[in-house]
Image: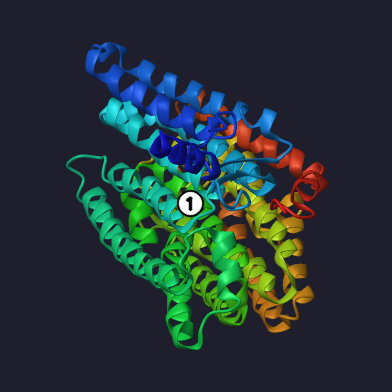
Amino acid sequence: MTATTDLTVLSAEAPSLVQSVDWLAIAPVVITAAVGLVVLVADLFLAERHKPALGWISVAGLAAATATLLPLRAGDRATFCLTGDPEACSYVADHFTLVIQFLVLAGALVTALLSVTAVRDTRMPAGEYWFLLLSSAAGAALLPASRDLATLIVALEVASLPAFALVGMRRGDRLSSEAALKFFLSSVTATAVSLMGVSFVYAATGSLHLTQVADRLEDVPGQLDTLAMAGVALTLVGFAFKTAAVPFHFWVPDTYVGAPLPIAGYLSVIGKAVGFTGLILVTVIAFPAYSDIWGPALAVLAALTMTLGNAAALRQSPDRPNSAVRLLAWSSVGQAGYLLVPIAAAAYSGRDQIGSTVAYALMYAAVNLGAFAVAALVARTKPLHRISDYRGLYAERPLAALSLGFFLLCLAGLPPGIIGLFAKVTVFRSAVDAGLGWLAVVMAINVVIALYYYLRWTALLFRTPEGAQTGTRAPWPVAAAIVVTAITAVVLSGAPELILRVTSGSLFAQ
């Protein structure tokens, strides 16, 4: 009787280890992953002629996952929290999480629309393709909500591993296989370095939760300080790779050329979202104590990244095969440099600067996916992907030409692409407010450099076409992707304060 009584007392005093799960908070990730599994299983039983239905199931699943963000808009939910420390949670659905999840899921939805036609025309295995795309999107949606280093790394790899296979999905294509292998080898190396960094941070702090890591890094014992600094530096490597920051950028042009065009667009937007989201979480939440280390490092990386990316894009010859995709690839490297500026500025003037990165990312996602959508349309009749193939596009496809011209002007930051100008001014201001005047000057120079290659491509759209035009009717999913991205860019250019309203103030749960 005494033993039973003692056990009862102990169980009453000990905190419960059973956690409740907020299913609504994790619904966007769970729905995306569940639809991926449904598609994979359905592929086993569907006849070949019914396989296109898998694409539409995936589109519907991504639309449903995006819709579940609406009831979460208050940004006040968290789950998988420590019983002893309710403030330390592994999954937090704050405003930062919701904005990035919207970017990821909406971007994946546009990619799915572009892929419906691409999967059918190139005869890629439908079941595997849609399962891999949904799995990657689920990992990318999980990452912004992750608030411990273990979940961050798992989300990073869930987003990345399917992408390797998607890049190499075109069987028998040497460029595709080479791109997938290069992407895989460089990515796993970066991940291994990051895992070593995480282990060092854990050894120095004894915790993986970002808020606890931040508190304990404020008072690291002297003998562990070097270990902690090494861990901080190494942890940043994997996320810098995903952002395509110099010197972790070398995989970008070959990977984009070898991948199916929808996947190249996906990597340019969602891949970057994964990278800069991870960087934001580990820097401003977990490692603010070492801002004197990662702040200057990211500022230098931002300057190098935008300069090298724009210089390489400037060198693309219009008549070279794949020059259009390569220009978009190098342009995305340059844009990554702009995205890094507010993160570096956060080391000097507080985490509220992060809103500038988020605002720029929202603009970039809409217009860059739109540019890839037009490229996918043009590639149906001109598969060499040359910039010169776009000469006289206005005479052949006026709406597509006008859309691409608008997207390029947004990327350049010129009217009528007001949203591009607005986003660049927002990033520029964050550098000035942080006292990084030299970085603002470098950014201004790079914006001028980028004007040349964006305007050269834009002007080509309206020149007199060479030879007879052989246009075909645009598949409606591709046309829908172009229309959606174009309308989004036009609306944001007319009312840029919409993005400012979303990204102003504190995005993180207090």
The extreme bottom residue here reads 222
Q: Secondary structure at mark 1?
A: helix
Quarter placement of the C terminus: bottom right
Q: Quadrant of residue 287?
A: bottom right
Answer whether residue 122 is visible to the viewer in this image: yes
Nearer to me, 115 or 4: 4
Query: Which residue corresponds to the image point at 21% horizontal and 45% vertical from the top-left?
Result: 173
**Residue 4 coordinates in the image, percent (x, y):** 41, 35
- Circle 1 is placed at which residue position? 268
**Residue 371 coordinates in the image, percent (x, y):** 54, 45
The extreme front residue here reads 1
**Residue 11 coordinates in the image, percent (x, y):** 48, 40
Quarter placement of the N terminus: top left
* Number of callouts: 1
* Scheme by which the image is coloured: rainbow
Nearer to me, 450 or 223: 223
313 relative to 394 in the view: left or right: left
**Residue 438 coordinates in the image, percent (x, y):** 69, 84
Task: Sort mark 1 into few (<14), some (14-19) or many (20+) by Cα contacts within 10 Å.
Answer: many
Q: Amino acid at mark 1?
A: Ser
Nearer to me, 440 or 87: 87
